[in-house]
């Protein structure tokens, strides 16, 4: 079965940076690669929000709320997908999850996620 583990969250001040890591494993992971991995987040009381995914032609899609501040990078050597988050804002506070890109609301389905708390 497919497994996804998120790590790297924590508490950080407004304007700071964090890098989250998604570590997939399981079913045919070597053949699947990493292009299917996407990042989502869910703030308390809010819906599951798609943050970033690998789009057609190698482009990376970002939500408007994080565009220009976040960078998603696949590391094919370590077999991980990082979400580099810069200039964090309090509104970025959420539990972050990685999951297949084609799902609209997968938050929590593959694990507990990693909590990012940005203080003002």
Image (cartoon, rainbow, N blue to C red):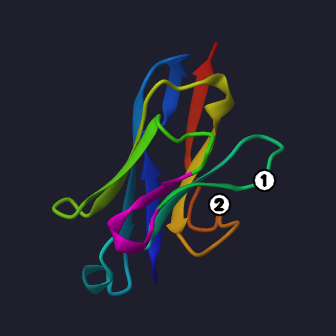
Decide: is 115 above or below 97.
above
Sequence-earlier tag: 1 or 2: 1
> In 3D space, how far apart are the residues under numbered discs 1 and 2 (Cα atoms)?
12 Å
Q: Position of residue 36 (x, y in %)?
A: 43, 73
Name which quarter of the figure residue 79 lies in.
bottom left
- Write down the residue under mark 2: 108
Q: Is residue 48 magenta?
A: no
> What span is colored magenta in the figure?
54-62
Q: Position of residue 28 (x, y in %)?
A: 32, 87
- Quick one: which residue is furthest to the right in this view? 45
Q: Quadrant of the C terminus?
A: top right
Judged from this view, the residue extending furthest toward the left is 77
Crowd tier of the residue under label 1, counting other residues whose Cα lies within 10 Å: few below 14, some 14–19, many 20 or above = few
Which residue is painted at 71% across and 56% down in the image?
48
Q: SS at mark 2?
A: loop
Report which quarter residue 14 is drawn in: top right
**Vertical position of residue 92 compared to residue 49: above or below:** above
Residue 56 magenta: yes
Q: Residue at x 78, y 53 (%)?
A: 47
Label 1 sits on a secondary structure element that is loop
Name the residue tied to disc 1: 47
Q: Say left or right for 69 vs 97.
A: left
Figure quadrant of residue 17: top left
């Amino acid at each position: 079965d497919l497994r996804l583990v998120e790590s790297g969250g924590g508490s950080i001040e407004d304007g700071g940076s964090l890098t989250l890591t998604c570590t997939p494993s399981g079913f045919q992971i070597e053949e699947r690669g990493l292009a299917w991995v996407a990042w989502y987040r869910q703030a308390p009381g809010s819906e599951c929000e798609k943050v970033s995914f690998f789009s057609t032609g190698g482009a990376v899609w970002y939500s408007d709320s994080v565009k220009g501040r976040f960078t998603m990078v696949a590391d094919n050597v370590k077999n991980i997908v990082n979400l580099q988050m810069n200039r964090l804002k309090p509104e970025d506070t959420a539990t972050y999850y990685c999951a297949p890109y084609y799902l609209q609301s997968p938050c929590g389905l593959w694990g507990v996620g990693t909590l990012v708390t940005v203080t003002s």
